[in-house]
Image (cartoon, rainbow, N blue to C red):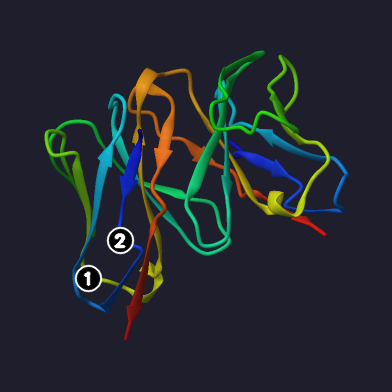
Amino acid sequence: NAGVMQNPRHLVRRRGQEARLRCSPMKGHSHVYWYRQLPEEGLKFMVYLQKENIIDESGMPKERFSAEFPKEGPSILRIQQVVRGDSAAYFCASSPPSTSGTEAFFGQGTRLTVV
Amino acid sequence: GQNIDQPTEMTATEGAIVQINCTYQTSGFNGLFWYQQHAGEAPTFLSYNVLDGLEEKGRFSSFLSRSKGYSYLLLKELQMKDSASYLCAVISTGGFKTIFGAGTRLFVKA
């Protein structure tokens, strides 16, 4: 049973380009969460999705950022027109369809560097 | 507002015991997690508390007091490999949104 898979592990983009980060949850997991972690800081919640639905996107910037979790395929976090401040590690986590006491399993993260 | 506070850094000696505290103020409470994160790696699950009291798991124990909005992680018989960040995280409203503290960086010295 593969864990949460994120790709790419490292992504370099020039300012103004688009970044697409992918996350395949663990088998049987229908909940996906995206977090951002700046160097030397904790994880900041961005968005929580279930299949084809965004449940909570209160942590995601209103502009340039979007997320989806289609019926088929991985969850995608998309950052348009990247700026230097977007450089961070982006972690995806998944959990099974339960609302209590369920730990989230994290992927290895995508480290985005904007140059 | 929602807030989780942890000390920024702690240092302890190999073989010793260390307690990492966490206080929280969140809108709703559906459980508290502790995660370990080594530099450059993904967080890994350590413990989960939803009821008051102590949960013990080998060298690691976690305590929760919901009335005080307080938890601690206790690490016994410290090893060098325990040097990492320890993240306190609370599941808030709706039972799904997990709020993380900034983490406590623990340095274990010989």
Q: Residue at the location (67% across, 33% down)?
A: A24
Q: Residue at the location (75% across, 24% down)?
A: A73
Q: Name which residue type carries label 2.
A: Pro
Q: Is residue A17 left or right of residue B18?
A: right
Q: Quadrant of residue B55?
A: top left
Q: Residue at the location (36% across, 74% down)?
A: B107
Residue B80 seen in the figure: yes
Per the image, label 2 sits on a secondary structure element best described as loop
Q: Nearer the viewer, mark 2 or mark 1?
A: 2
- Binning the other alpha carbons within 10 Å of mark 2 as few (below 14), some (14 to 19) or many (20 upward) gives some
Q: Residue at the location (83% across, 59% down)?
A: A115
Q: Quadrant of residue B98?
A: top left
Q: Is residue A35 left or right of residue B4?
A: right
Q: Is residue A48 left or right of residue A100?
A: right
Q: Quadrant of residue B94?
A: top left
**Residue B77: which numbered mark, if any?**
1
Q: Name which residue type carries label 1.
A: Glu
Q: Position of residue B73 (x, y in %)?
A: 24, 54
